[in-house]
């Protein structure tokens, strides 16, 4: 007899072995509270760019919202419960945008791409949440004499160098003020999956929102300073499936750097509050 799908369970390919464990479902069906994990170190750098260049990245019903400030953020996570204590790293590029649909209106940080160095969060994040996730190599940053050096590469081709330095530690009062001053509904995404055999059309195409509320995340310390970055132009031969992404970022005007930060946090959420915007 063939297997049947249980509507109360979560599946992903291959479905033939029953419901799958992942970030939103443990092996016993329970959820992960994310109270004492993950431990994260986040290195971010922002710069002002040409708004016309960013508008080319926006899907239908999206527009720029405020100054055209791009933020490149690398996160290094450890002790992740849903991975039984393992970790992985991410690299995201985002800027402020607004979604205006037939039903919903939302302003937030539009995540254009999120590189990750592990298959499991890429698959679960793309299929279940609609994050624009792809793979790259993200080694631990080099820290030397007050400077932190972030690199990203794909099968040996280095496409990013990012440096931050001249850091000073913020007080708890400064951190608390920053948390209360941050606005926006959360992180905006555009989920797209092509229709098999009809490659120019979509099986799925819609906006999604990661709500900003993350009550279990605590900032342990935060340092602010200065930085610089360079996306390295790639040939098709260097990155056959990603060269156009990297080159789009390499072509962005860097009109002014807007500061850098190094933040250490604990806790998070399982992102099961992700929702579709219509």
Image (cartoon, rainbow, N blue to C red):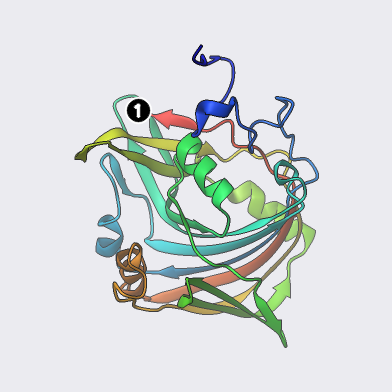
Whether residue 11 is visible? no
The residue at the far top in this view is: 1
Whether residue 9 is visible? yes
Q: Is residue 18 above or below residue 264?
A: above
Give the residue displayed 27% in from the left and 64% down from the top: 53
Q: Is residue 249 above or below residue 33?
A: below
Q: Is residue 121 left or right of residue 264?
A: left
Q: Position of residue 236 (x, y in %)?
A: 29, 72
Where is mark 1, residue-wise?
Answer: 278
Q: Position of residue 214 (x, y in %)?
A: 66, 40
Q: Is residue 5 left or right of residue 149?
A: left
Locate the C terminus by quadrant.
Answer: top left
Give the residue displayed 52% in from the left and 27% down from the top: 16
Give the residue displayed 25% in from the left and 41% down from the top: 60
- Give the tally of numbered discs: 1
Assess disc 1: are there few (<14), some (14-19) or many (≥20) residues with their C-alpha within 10 Å of its C-alpha. some
């Amino acid at each position: 007899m063939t297997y049947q799908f249980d509507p109360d369970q979560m599946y992903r390919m291959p479905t033939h072995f029953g419901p799958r464990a992942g970030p939103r479902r443990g092996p016993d069906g329970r959820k992960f509270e994310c109270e004492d994990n993950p431990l994260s170190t986040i290195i971010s750098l922002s710069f002002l760019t040409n708004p016309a260049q960013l508008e080319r990245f926006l899907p239908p019903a999206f527009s720029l919202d405020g100054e055209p400030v791009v933020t490149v953020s690398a996160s290094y996570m450890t002790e992740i419960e849903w991975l039984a204590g393992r970790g992985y790293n991410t690299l995201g590029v985002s800027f402020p945008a607004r979604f205006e649909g037939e039903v919903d209106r939302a302003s937030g940080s539009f995540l254009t791409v999120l590189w990750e160095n592990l298959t499991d969060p890429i698959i679960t994040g793309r299929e279940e949440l609609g994050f624009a996730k792809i793979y790259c190599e993200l080694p631990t940053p080099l820290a030397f004499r007050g400077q932190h050096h972030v690199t990203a590469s794909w099968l040996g081709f280095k496409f990013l160098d990012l440096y931050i330095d001249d850091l000073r530690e913020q007080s708890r009062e400064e951190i608390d003020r920053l948390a209360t001053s941050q606005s926006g509904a959360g992180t905006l995404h555009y989920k797209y999956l092509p229709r098999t055999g009809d490659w120019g059309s979509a099986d799925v195409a819609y906006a999604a929102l990661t709500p900003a509320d993350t009550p279990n995340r605590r900032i342990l310390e935060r340092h602010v300073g200065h930085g610089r970055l360079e996306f390295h132009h790639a040939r098709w031969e260097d990155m056959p499936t990603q060269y156009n992404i990297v080159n789009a970022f390499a072509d962005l005007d860097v009109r002014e750097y807007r500061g850098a930060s190094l933040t250490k946090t604990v806790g998070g959420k399982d992102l099961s509050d992700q929702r579709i915007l219509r």
